[in-house]
Image: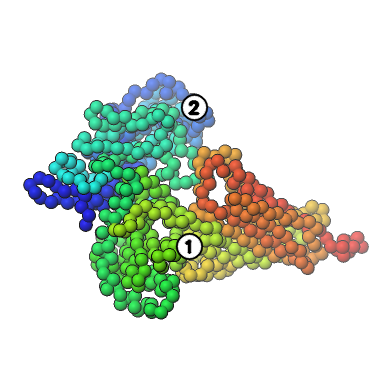
Amino acid sequence: MTHHVKRLANGLSGLFAFLLVFSATAVSPAWSASQQTADSHWAAVKPEELALKDNPDRPGSAAMILYRQEDVDDIKSTADFYYRVKVFSQEGEKYGTVEIPYVERLDTVEDVRARTIEADGTVVEFSGEILDKTLLKYRKFRYQAKVLVVSDVRPGSIIEYAYRVQWRGSKKPDFLKHPLAYEFTHPIVLSCGEWRVQEDLFTRRARFTMNPYKTTRVDWTAFGLPPGKTPQAVADGSFELELENIAGLDAEENMPPEDVLRAKVAFFYSFGYFSAESLWRDQAQARSEEFERYLGSSKQVQPAVDSVVSGNEPALDKLRKLYARAQQVRNLSYEPERTAQEEANEALKTNKNVADVLKNGYGTGLQVNLLFIALARAAGFNAHLLLVADRERTFFRENLFDWDQLNANVVEVRLNDLDAPLYLDPATKFCPFGSLPWGETGTRGIRLDPNNGGIVEIPPPHSGDARITRTADLRLDATGALQGKLHVRFEGQEALERRLEALDEDETTRHKNLEDEVKSWLPASASVKVTAARAWDDSGQPLEADFDVDFPEFGSKSGQRLLIPVGVFQSGQNRPFAQADRAYPVYFRYPWQESDDVTVTLPAGYKVQASPDSQQTTPFGHYKIACQQNDGTVRIHREFTIEEFTYSADRYPLLRAYYFAAGTSDHHQAVLGPTVSAQAASRQ
């Protein structure tokens, strides 16, 4: 174990591993960076607040925050919050339903109080019931909210509420309280909370305070503060910040995680001098010791390796088999949370090391990945664990010294010293060899390696890693109705995402979800019926489904002609990015490819008189649509790709133009008219 702190008093060794100290950042969740009203009673409401009819800085707002205050007290492990919200319209009445988020088992919400002040000054105190609501449940993680509905909220009302969050398990290390009694051989950083500066609503005025321990240096890192605004140190060792006219976080389609966009300030205690890079490197090397002990000796798993691979196999084939062996372990992270009685009945043993995981045949997702590392090392591969930011929820920021941002783990394996590393995750159910779930691609984190630990970057995904192929054989009648068979093939990320979403669903629900998805591609009058769906549990194969589809009003009549849109499976979709301007980057889960091959059998006596073809290649992707007429049929081939997963706001106009051009081409119509013989017959 690497020691960073040594107690000097009485010649005793009170030793702290760096990883334990740094991990203390997980004590308080990021959102509960705290606040508190300065007075235990409500502040007086000003006449101008009652009279306010709109937000002068943003006319037309449904509501705004007149004032809010956050007071964090790391010594008491509390955060106090106060909000005064003005409602301007019926839409703003929704803010009378207050949700107070907290993490179950880590936080408690206390001293909740609320009231409504009507436009005439009448006060209605909240006396209703406070309910619990689950906001997010991810495996054994539960993100909850206390919910209260404030009475008599209408345009012109003011809503006031306040509460305290007490976070648990926050015992501080002794060296924080008595630093002079210790010798620090390496820099140490310990979180002491954060301010959530930006809310969804525009905020007229806000005040933030932080009360840390006064025994050591306190630093901070700010994200998104206005120019020239920083936390100010107060004579008593606390910090404060006052701001005015804080923009709200307006939702935009396909935007990055809110955690990345919100303005905030994070505080931390620091011992010694360091750079962010060196601190994460030290952390990675120190924490690797914990995992190296858990991995144990290769001898413990060697029999399992020998039973799976042989010495003369190609290296990649060996690794693929070891990956499959690790995925055979019962993955407890995908099972519903059990009650205490259920746990007692099953009596699962604790896995103290990788050998136990192998022997017991079960483990958490992290333990499955550690087993794979042990198997790979026993077979002669260089393998390490990476702790990374799952970009579905956040991005890794090296100057934010918060262990919680590393919320996912990946295995890095090198076949040899010359080849690029492979990034694998057997702990994710249905994740095929050679792939990662999308949140673990194009992200950053740290490599846990006692010799070469530090910040690492996982390459971005490619469009070929996510593909949807639609093949259809359809028949059009003279009224414009279209019906027939559709086959859809989901590959890569597209298959993995649907398999994970369907993990706990029965066949009926799976089929309904597929039908709803296909319906979203088509006009509202269309009907869809699944006839078969295959390979739900086979990660080595594409996920495929067959459908009967019926478009009763697909084509339109114009005299003797029929008009049909050439983008058959885009005919019911709304065009994205309708707004002309954008504040935030465009953020897709991953790049992707679509390919359609549609054969339409024409009504007797009709042929294609005109059909649009279109093609464009841009930095954003490639689009192509083409029609080919054969005897009695028209074959429509369409391709569409997006080649990156994030685009800065200044590139938005060009991306929007690409989408608009593709959408316009999809809605162009092929003109079908009677053949010469049909025209002659109609004249007779």
CA gap between label 1 and label 2 equals 45 Å
Which image quarter is the N terminus in? bottom left
Kind of residue at badge 2? Asp
Query: Which one is in front, 244 or 117?
Result: 244
Image coordinates of residue 540 in percent, x first then y, are 48, 70
The answer to whether residue 474 is above or below residue 173 is: below
- Which residue ends up furthest to the front in the rendered image? 418
Q: Give the total number of marks visible in the rendering.
A: 2
Residue at x 77%, y 61% (from the top left corner): 478
The answer to whether 529 appears left or right of 431 in the picture is right
Q: In the rendering, which numbered label is found on residue 57?
A: 2
For label 1, the SS is helix
Query: Which one is in front, 187 or 159?
Result: 187
Which image quarter is the C terminus in? bottom right
Residue at x 60%, y 42% (from the top left corner): 653
Query: Which one is in front, 569 or 72?
Result: 72
**Mark 1 lies on residue:** 496
Kind of residue at badge 1? Leu
Q: Judge the density around disc 1: few (<14), some (14-19), many (≥20) Cα neighbours within 10 Å.
A: many
Query: Which one is in front, 497 or 417?
Result: 417
Mark 1 or mark 2, earlier in chain: 2
For label 2, the SS is loop
- Which residue ends up furthest to the left in the rendered image? 10
